[in-house]
Image (spheres, rainbow, N blue to C red):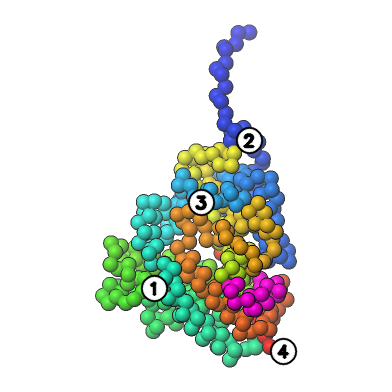
Amino acid sequence: MHHEPSAPAPRRTAAETAPLSEPVQLPTARPKGCPFDPPRELADLREQRGIVRMRYPDGHIGWLATSHAAVRSLTADPRFSSRYELMHYPFPGMDLAEIPPAPVGDLTGIDQPEHTRYRRLLAGKFTVRRMRELTARVEQITTEHLDAMERRGPSVDLVEAYAHPVPALMICELLGVPHADRAVFQRHAATLSGVDSTREEQFAAYTALQEVVHDLVLAKRARPTDDLLSDLTTSDLTDEELAGIGSFLLAAGLDTTANMIGLGTFALLSNPEQAVALRSEPDLADQAVEELLRYLSIAHTGVRAALEDVELDGRLIRAGESVTISVQAANRDPARFADPDTLDLHRKATGHLAFGHGVHQCLGQQLARVEMRVALPALFTRFPTLRLAVPPEEVPLRVGMDVYGVHRLPVTWGA
């Protein structure tokens, strides 16, 4: 039998010849009795390889990045897009065949040059100097809420009494929401993140908040005051863009910081020697905040989409493939942090990825730091006998949500 001479096989890169394991599914179940630890399977996968094949709920075969090095390089690489409509949704149980594009003003779901334009306008508004000026206001707000807790005590739901209202009022302060509107603003914000709110109630609250922000934009244009929205009315942003950015900052800044204060308190109550350190060493606050951010990694999972073929960590990621980024696995990577599963407020946790990395690194990170730096030490100093009012396993956790945390945290204090 006659054979045509075969053409020489094309040379294959190391990335293409690397053995590919069977695609995994995204692990989401946290270990029983360890509410602060990521799913154990993430550590097993990270040990095998920093980036592995992953099967998405819609059947797409993409990737999962778990090592600190892989997540860091991915988030800094402009060849990976943040546009929602290019991504596949990684979480099981939510039937999202197609993700709609980001709404106007949502910085996390867009790429440059659009992202660069918004970012440049906003970056100057979140300066360390402005945040330091807001510190005095945070101190005042936390004191008022601790006083109210003491009057109501000796037991409260810490989320409702403290963790939620402090960042809500600080966002009002930053955006310049007038005092008369703050109660309405807080009510809608509480509905939005409430465990008992129905989807319809949450949607109605979000729509109502957008209307509040839109009216606020028109008011700032007519009569500017000393706040972020007023500053932005002098830019080339349209009313729609301003309202979109205001709503985005509101949603981004409220949910995350509220859950850091709530879950951070739960973690400290579960590690009493760390709570003692925070209370007795005033200089520890900054370091403690960074370690809690690393240890808890509440914004636990992200996604990017490859815009072209990219070689990363010895893998060839093809254009169009989605890569799920496990921030919680990266922040517990023993290659980057020694003894990573231990909460140690004396650790120098610099280099953690809790605020992301690269051009999409969290804009409001300085405000979040200021709020936590004030709120957590103040809480433990005011109530040195603070403890859970229910067994730890009865604290309702925000599972299956983009931002991890606690729905409620019943606490008590005193003899």
* Residue 75: image tag: 3
Say few, some or many: other residues with alpha carbon within 10 Å of mark 4 (under 14 / 14 to 19 / 20 or more): few
Element marked by disc 2? loop
Q: Main secondary structure of the magenta part?
A: helix
Q: Is residue 276 magenta?
A: yes
Q: Quadrant of residue 13?
A: top right
Q: Secondary structure at mark 4?
A: loop
Residue type indicated by callout 4: Ala
Marks 2 and 4 close (CB-CB < 8 Å): no
Residue 247 coordinates in the image, percent (x, y): 41, 68
Does 142 sit above or below residue 116? below
Looking at the rendering, which quadrant does residue 385 occupy?
bottom right
In terms of secondary structure, where does tag 3 sit? Answer: helix
Q: Residue 84: percent from the left, percent from the top?
A: 46, 53
Three-letter residue code for mark 3? Thr
Question: Which residue corresponds to mark 2?
Answer: 18
Which one is in front, 103 or 7? 7
Q: CA distance from mark 2 to mark 1?
A: 50 Å
Which residue is at 39% across, 73% downward? 175
Residue 327 visible within the image: yes
Q: Which mark is residue 415?
A: 4
Say what amino acid the circle numbered 2 marks: Ala
